[in-house]
Image (cartoon, rainbow, N blue to C red):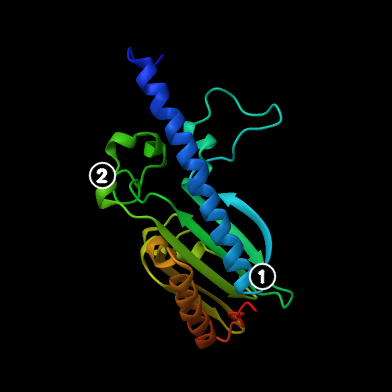
């Protein structure tokens, strides 16, 4: 058993602050996803935890589940679709610390947070993925690969195309900056004939 701490009052105080901060932060992220969804004329089609299992619920799970399973927005995919069959996802990785460290090749080390890169040298990223007639990450080494997290990528197969573009969350800190980045992504998509279009709000 890992003991909480003899100074339990201070620990629980900081935990309450952290939970309330995370609520506000994650609400901002959800608002941003709604803004991106509306600005690109998309329909939300579900989300997927990428770092751990989904939060145990409805009587499922056990006490051996990772604590990460209750914090699954650490690395998360928001998936969207268009009526014309175009697929689009925004992956948010709130802390690249695991992937920036020597832990990264070893999934079991995701619980060794003391071995992660320090927070000051880690980053928070959004990764946009758009595709037409294709949705397959295997050629990129899956969504967990170093290339996917750090590089703009593409897969072309005859009439099939899938592209990705990496942003820092800082580039979406204000509405003006978010619009600028979305218009940039629109141009990137059009290079590959993927009909993602920024829609100016009235």
The relative height of residue 14 versus residue 149 in the rendered view (above or below) is: above
Measured as percent of width and height from the top left, residue 148 is found at 42, 63
Between residue 14 and residue 106, name the one nearer to us: 14
Measured as percent of width and height from the top left, residue 159 is found at 62, 84
Measured as percent of width and height from the top left, residue 114 is found at 29, 34
Instruction: Examine the image and state in which quarter residue 168 appears.
Output: bottom left
**Is residue 143 visible from the viewing direction of this image?**
no
Measured as percent of width and height from the top left, residue 96 is found at 36, 51
**Is residue 184 visible from the viewing direction of this image?**
yes
Q: Kindly give the residue lying farthest to the front in the view shown.
A: 202
Give the labeled residue for mark 1.
42
Identify the residue shown where x is 38% and y is 16%. Answer: 8
Identify the residue shown where x is 52% and y is 53%. Answer: 28
Label 1 secondary element: loop
Label 2 secondary element: loop
Q: Which mark is residue 106?
A: none
Q: CA distance from mark 2 to mark 1?
A: 36 Å
Between residue 52 and residue 124, name the one nearer to us: 124
Give the labeled residue for mark 2.
118
Left/right of residue 60 with respect to residue 19 in the rendered view:
right
Identify the residue shown where x is 57% and y is 67%. Answer: 36
Q: Label 1: few (<14), some or many (≥20) within 10 Å?
A: many
Q: Kindly give the residue lying farthest to the right in the view shown.
A: 83
Quarter of the picture holding the N terminus: top left
Left/right of residue 176 with respect to residue 104 in the rendered view:
right
Between residue 41 and residue 133, name the one nearer to us: 41
Answer whether labels 2 and 1 touch (C-beta < 8 Å).
no
The relative height of residue 63 versus residue 160 in the rendered view (above or below) is: above
Q: Label 2: few (<14), some or many (≥20) within 10 Å?
A: some
Q: How many marks overall? A: 2
């Amino acid at each position: 058993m890992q003991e909480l701490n003899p100074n339990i009052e201070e620990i629980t105080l900081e935990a309450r602050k952290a939970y309330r901060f995370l609520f506000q932060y994650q609400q901002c992220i959800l608002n941003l996803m709604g803004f991106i969804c509306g600005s690109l004329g998309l329909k939300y089609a579900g989300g997927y935890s990428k770092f751990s299992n989904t939060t145990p619920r409805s009587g499922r799970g056990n006490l051996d589940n990772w604590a990460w399973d209750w914090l699954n927005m650490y690395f998360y995919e928001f998936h969207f679709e268009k009526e014309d069959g175009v697929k689009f996802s925004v992956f948010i990785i709130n802390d690249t610390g695991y992937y920036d460290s020597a832990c990264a090749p070893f999934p079991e080390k995701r619980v060794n947070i003391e071995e992660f890169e320090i927070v000051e040298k880690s980053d928070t990223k959004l990764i946009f993925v758009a595709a037409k007639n294709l949705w397959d990450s295997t050629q990129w080494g899956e969504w967990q690969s170093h290339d996917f997290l750090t590089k703009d990528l593409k897969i072309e197969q005859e009439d099939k195309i899938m592209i990705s573009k990496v942003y820092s969350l800082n580039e979406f800190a204000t509405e003006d900056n978010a619009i600028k980045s979305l218009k940039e992504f629109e141009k990137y998509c059009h290079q590959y004939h993927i009909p993602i279009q920024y829609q100016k709000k009235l």
